[in-house]
Image (spheres, rainbow, N blue to C red):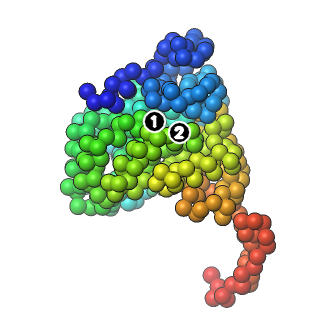
Amino acid sequence: MEKWQDILRDSVTSPTLLNEYFNVDVTSLNQVIATFPMRINPYYLQLIQKAGTPLWKQAVPDVAELLDPVCMEDPLGEERLSPVPNLVHKYPDRVLFLVSTQCAMYCRFCTRKRKVGTDRMVISPDTIEAGLDYIRHHPQVREVLLSGGDPLLLPDSQIEYLLSELRAIPSVKVIRIGTRVPCTLPMRVTPKLVAILKKFHPLYINTHFNHPAEITPESSAACTLLADAGIPLGCQTVLLKGVNDTPAVMRELLLKLLEIRVKPYYLFQTDLTRGTNHFRTSTATGIRIMRSLIGHISGMAVPTFALDGPGGKGKIPLTPDYILTRGDKLVFENYCGEICTYPESGDGI
Ligand SMILES: *Cc1c(COP(=O)(O)O)cnc(C)c1O
Ligand code: SF4
């Protein structure tokens, strides 16, 4: 077994075990994990300084998960948009292909909480072959996003198999992997894995960091290995109440990501996933944070704030409104709140 597999095997998966590190209410947390599994691997566990901190909130089950009054099982309508199991075809030219049921940690706010890490998610050689076949027969699919669960929790041989099958399909131009491993289990990014990945360019990786305390020497080293292999790295952050919902925390996170060669890509408004309502902020909070970033920090560090439309309507950018009036002149505010004008060209729309 590789070292990362040993680390993963020693994960805390029960409230009783967690109680050896932090004082938790074992009985009520047992009720939560009967529906939504927990897994906190030793690497992430040692990053959690104390109860109630942003890293704690992402990893440790909360009874609020069972008391969610508003949210839905499958807010993005993924099951309905799956022509074959575990393949979501929402946009014309790209598909989301779920290839792993496992993650290095089960994030409490996960959009696919309904199934990730449980026996409600079934991935088998048959579903993988059905997904590959669908892609082979739909040449309009020019980009495949591998997700799950976390694709990088698969064994190296399976990752290599999947990537080589996808690369053998001429219509697939770009492969994108969504993985939280560089953040939650950076030792999974081994030189051997990277040697496999770099054979399948153009390959992009979007990772997922939510708090500056997740950027450590280990996660930085993992990103360096990937970036040195020519893999462009993006980040999909989720806006989470009590975790990163202030301008100061978000700014520190985004600037640190850029330092470890990860380009912030999306900042997501929390989906309406059942069991995650306690993480939801108002969209106004996100827009206010975006206004505090745009122009004030490097544009390279500024992600697109997006809402994934309930029911599978697609991602909608939510941006601060700088425009005051339109007409012969566009009147707008700049990032400092100064009023500016720009005379229109007069060719009309
Ligand atoms: C988010 C998503 C994508 C990718 O969207 P981008 O804007 O290209 O990042 C593709 N398919 C599905 C089903 C998605 O949810
Ligand atoms: S790593 Fe991603 S898929 Fe896995 S539990 Fe966290 S948010 Fe969900």
In the image shown, does 74 or 343 lie closer to the viewer? 343
Amino acid on which disc 2 is placed: Glu
In the image shown, does 303 or 23 lie closer to the viewer? 23
Residue at 51% in and 20% down = 33
| Percent of width and height locating residue 269 | 60, 47
Q: Quadrant of the C terminus?
A: bottom right
What SS does tag 1 mark? helix
Q: Which residue is mark 1?
A: 184
Position of 248 with respect to 60 (left or right) is: right
Marks 2/1: CA–CA distance: 8 Å
Position of 118 with respect to 257 (left or right) is: left
Q: Earlier in the sequence, mark 2 or mark 1?
A: 1
Amino acid on which disc 1 is placed: Thr
Ligand 2 within 8 Å of disc 1? The answer is yes
Q: Quadrant of residue 152?
A: top left
Q: Which residue is mark 2?
A: 214
Residue at 63% in and 51% down = 251
Position of 17 with respect to 53 (left or right) is: left
- Residues at discs 2 and 1 in contact (Cβ within 8 Å): yes
Give me the disc on residue 126: none
Q: Quadrant of the N terminus?
A: top left
| Percent of width and height locating residue 25 | 61, 13
Residue at 42% in and 22% down = 11
| Percent of width and height locating residue 17 | 49, 14
| Percent of width and height locating residue 224 | 40, 50
